Amino acid sequence: MNPAALLDKVNRGDFCVGIVGLGRVGLPLGIAFARKGIRVIGVDRNEELLALVGAGTMPFYEEDEHDSLTKVIASGKLSVTSDYDALREADILFITVATSLNIEQRVDFSQLYSALEGLCPRLRPVQLLILRSTVSPGTLEKIVKPFIEKHTDLEVGKDILLASAPERISAGRALIELETLPEIVGGLDSITTDIVGAALRTLNPKKLIHRTDPVSAELAKLFTNVYRYVTFAVANEFALLAEHHGRNAHSIIRTINEGYPRGNIPLPGPCGGPCLAKDGYLLVEELSYPDFILTAWKLNEGVPSHLVHRLKDALSKEGKRLADTKIGVLGKAFKADIDDLRQSPAMRIIELLEREGADVLCHDPFHDTPPLDVVIEDADAVVLATNHTAFRELRPAEMRKKTKPDCIFVDCWGQWDEPDEEGRILMFGRGDAT
Ligand SMILES: NC(=O)c1ccc[n+]([C@@H]2O[C@H](COP(=O)([O-])OP(=O)(O)OC[C@H]3O[C@@H](n4cnc5c(N)ncnc54)[C@H](O)[C@@H]3O)[C@@H](O)[C@H]2O)c1
């Protein structure tokens, strides 16, 4: 087979997909292809995860899943294994392993290298390898290509085709967004980009495919996330400024945005997760002037400790020490309506409170946690740490029937923006004079 024959195969919908890494990106991608009738082989090294997925059980929360996994496993369209040999059958391979920062805050590509080590002895002509993970600019050409050239006899561009096509779904909404989001595809050559585009269009024939080169595709992904991250940091700086001036950043930002065509400022709130903060580092690691993005990182990372300090101060004004208090925390996940705890600001708040010696109980509807009533019962403080929809109707006045009568409510999200004569609702971005 040659690249043109592979393109024909893909255009006919007669191709097999292999996926390395069945996490929050890889598994939904596999399900999405399998739901369209494409045969998918998923490889992961986590045997526990493989047992769950093989039994048709989703290992994490995904909106719009509707038993799809059970169905595609039962139909045989998706099979999962730890054996890389199974991937010989695949025409198109996606790498979807995690990329993170190590303890020294440097980019950790160990999963990418281990995936390449697993793949190289099994690669055969003609296969297309798509880097879907988020990586530093140039990774396809500086790491993946030389690795394959060194560890196989295959010729890149003839036997093995390479492309970057980074994933841009929002965690928890992958199965919805995989059908709707435009794709940014950078093949090493034009026919490779054609094949990637054709393969991704099986998810939706109307899918918009932006054609570019690999470095631009990798940069586009990082710019997408870092732009959001920096914007959230600005909103968080506005929150600190408004607090300093005794004003309310939420109402100021709403005032700016309403009816004004150049507003669109996001509301403040804790910002975290496995992608946004890390992606800034991927973007700037080779440069010596990354101050703007690092400042955003400092701002966002500082929000949990700022909120814990505010609570500590408020308690101490009442003669209480954090170490002697019971705190109920609402939410563990890093954002609303998902179960992902990685780099979650809510988890950081819990950690900081526990470090001060507080007795912390947490309720999160996406996790096996004590019920809400138990968590807030006799609490000295209640912290709204994640803005899950399930918490939207909760009101301090109602919860105070269960908590201690002098309970302090900490609202990280501006959901309890209501008159507070006694100063017992601490809202991120709202200063004392409001
Ligand atoms: N989570 C998101 O919402 C999201 C969105 C867009 C992009 N991304 C990016 O996509 C990539 C994957 O993220 P994720 O959240 O899916 O990570 P994840 O940790 O959920 O999944 C990675 C999976 O790869 C497996 N794995 C690791 N090394 C392996 C190997 N050598 N062979 C086989 N399997 C291996 C792990 O066991 C794990 O199941 C990252 O680069 C991330 O930044 C994530």
Image: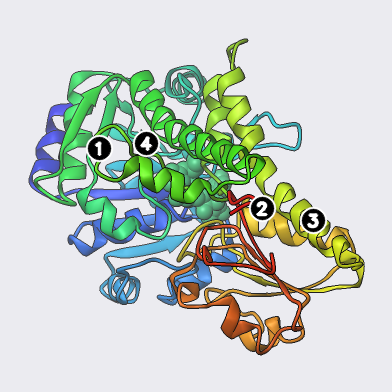
The one of 120 and 175 positioned closer to us in this rendering: 175
Which one is earlier in the sequence, the residue at label 3 or at label 2? 3
Q: Is residue 84 visible?
A: no
Above or below — where is 65 with respect to 200? below
Residue nearest the viewer, comparing 179 with 422: 422
| Residue type, label 4 | Pro
Q: Badge 3 local density, few (<14 within 10 Å), some, or many (20+)?
A: some
Select label 1 or label 3 by which is in front.
3
Q: Write down the residue under mark 1.
A: 183
First of labels 1, 3 by sequence position: 1
Gap in angstroms between the C-alphas marked 3 and 2? 23 Å
The answer to which image quadrant residue 355 occupies is bottom right
In the rendered image, the vertical position of residue 429 relative to residue 256, given as above or below? below
Circle 1 Cα neighbour tier, 10 Å, few/some/many (<14 / 14–19 / ≥20): many
Inter-mark Cα distance, 1 to 4: 8 Å
The disc at residue 432 is 2
Disc 4, SS: loop
What amino acid is labelled 1 in the image?
Answer: Glu
Q: Amino acid at mark 2?
A: Asp
Question: Around disc 2, counting alpha carbons within 10 Å, would you say few (fewer than 14), some (14 to 19), or many (20 or more)?
Answer: some
Q: Position of residue 5 (x, y in %)?
A: 13, 33
Give the answer, above or below, for where 212 lies relative to 234.
above
Residue 333 occupies which quadrant of the picture?
bottom right
- In the image, which disc is placed on residue 166? 4
**Sequence order check, earlier mark of 1 and 4:** 4
Q: Position of residue 84 (x, y in %)?
A: 47, 49
